[in-house]
Amino acid sequence: MLSGFLGAGKTTLLKRILSWQGDLSDTVVIVNEFGDIGVDGSLLKDTGSDVIELTSGCICCTLSADFRQLLLSIGERFKPKRVFIEASGVADPTSLISVLGEPALVEIMAITKVVTVLDADFWEAREMFGPLFYHQLGAAHLVLLNKVDLLDNDRIPIFLREIHELLPDAQVVPTIHCGIDPDTLWAPKTLGLKPMDFFHPAAGHDHLSDEHSDHGHPVDASRYVMFSFQGPHVMQESCFRKFVAELPWEMFRVKGSVRFLDRTIMLNFVGGKAEWLPWDAESETRLAFIGWNVNQAETLGRVKRCVLPG
C-alpha cells in the first residue's frame, strides 16, 4: 500500500517501482483518486501491469464497499502475485488496513508493506495538519522523506531524527524523486500491522497552509554517499553490533556479509532498522554503505576498530 499526503510523490514512486525489470503480468495496480477525473492511471498505462482506477471518492470511506468488492474480484478471478494500492492523498490507511483485515480478504491476500511518502517540506508544517497526516505516517513500515533536494542541508538530519523519535519502529529513508532501490523497498517490515491511535495535540487543520512555501537553498544530490568495506576480516561481534546500533539517522542503508568468529551473517540495515540473517556463502566481511552527507572516513574507522587482531 502506498500512502501519503497530496502531492508527496506516490505516483512517482509507483512508476519507479513498475519500471524495475521483471515480469509484471501477475501484478495489479489500484489507483484511487478523490476527484471525478482519473489522471494517475493514464500516467501508469505503459508500465506493463493492469491498472484499475477508483475515482469520485476515497477508498477509506465513500468507496470502501467498492474497494472491498474489487479486491475480492481480483483475488478470485486473477490470483495475482502482487497488488499495489495507491491510496488517494486524503485516504486514512488505518481504515484501509481494517478493510484488508476482514476474514474474506485475509483468506486470499495479505499486506506485505505500507509505504508512506512524506513531502519533506510538509514535515516542518506538521502542526497545521489534522490526524489524517499522522495516521498516514503511523501506519507505515517504510517512510520516504521525499524531495529533500528542496531543503537546506542542515535541516535533513534534524527532520530524520524527529521522524525517528515519533515513529521509532518505522524505517525512514531520505529520497529525491522517490529514488530507492528494490532491496530497500522489499526489506522486511519491522513492525506489526496495527494502526497507531495517536493524535497530534496541536493539529487543528485538515489542509495545507499556502503560506508555507520557503524551500531554502537546494541541496546537492552528490551529498548521497556510497562506499564499501571488504576483506577477510573477523569482526568482534559485540563491538560491531554496537557500531550498527549507533549509526546516525543519515546512514540509511548498510548491506552485506559480516564474518564473526563462529559464523558469518548477512546484515540488512534500512532506515534505522537492522536485520541479521544466517549466511553460508562467502566467509568474509563485505559491506556496502549508502547515506546522506555522512563521514566516510569516520564510519570506516569505526568499522576497523571492530576487526579482531589477526
Image: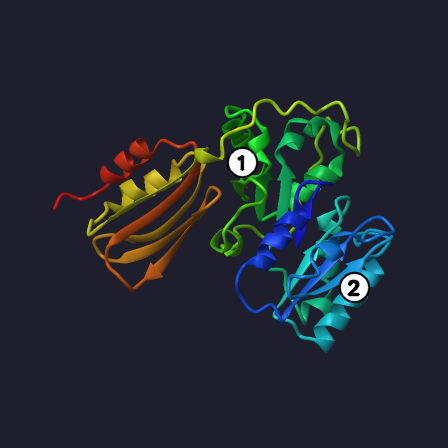
Disc 2 crowd, CA 10 A, few/some/many (<14, 14-19, 20+): some
State the scheme by which the image is colored.
rainbow
Spot the residue most to the bottom: 77
Residue 96 appears left or right of 165? right
Residue 224 appears left or right of 168? left
Residue 56 appears left or right of 73? right
Amino acid carrying label 2: it is Arg
> In the figure, 238 relative to 78: above or below?
above
Q: Is residue 193 visible?
A: no
Which residue is found at the position 59% from the left and 30% from the top? 150
The quadrant the N terminus occupies is bottom right
Q: Position of residue 112 (x, y in %)?
A: 59, 59
Q: Which residue is mark 1?
A: 164
Q: Position of residue 168 (x, y in %)?
A: 54, 39
Q: Position of residue 198 (x, y in %)?
A: 69, 38
- Looking at the image, which is closer to me, 308 or 10? 10
Q: Position of residue 295 (x, y in %)?
A: 36, 31
Label 2: state its secondary structure. Answer: helix
**Does label 1 or label 2 sit earlier along the sequence?**
2
Spot the residue most to the front: 46
Which residue is found at the position 53% from the left and 66% from the top? 22
Disc 1 crowd, CA 10 A, few/some/many (<14, 14-19, 20+): some
Which residue is found at the position 19% from the left and 52% from the top? 232
> In the figure, 94 relative to 28: above or below?
above
- How far apart are the alpha carbons under marks 1 and 2? 33 Å
Q: Which mark is on residue 68? A: 2
Amino acid carrying label 1: it is His
Q: Is residue 247 visible?
A: yes
Label 1: state its secondary structure. Answer: helix
Which picture quadrant has residue 291? top left
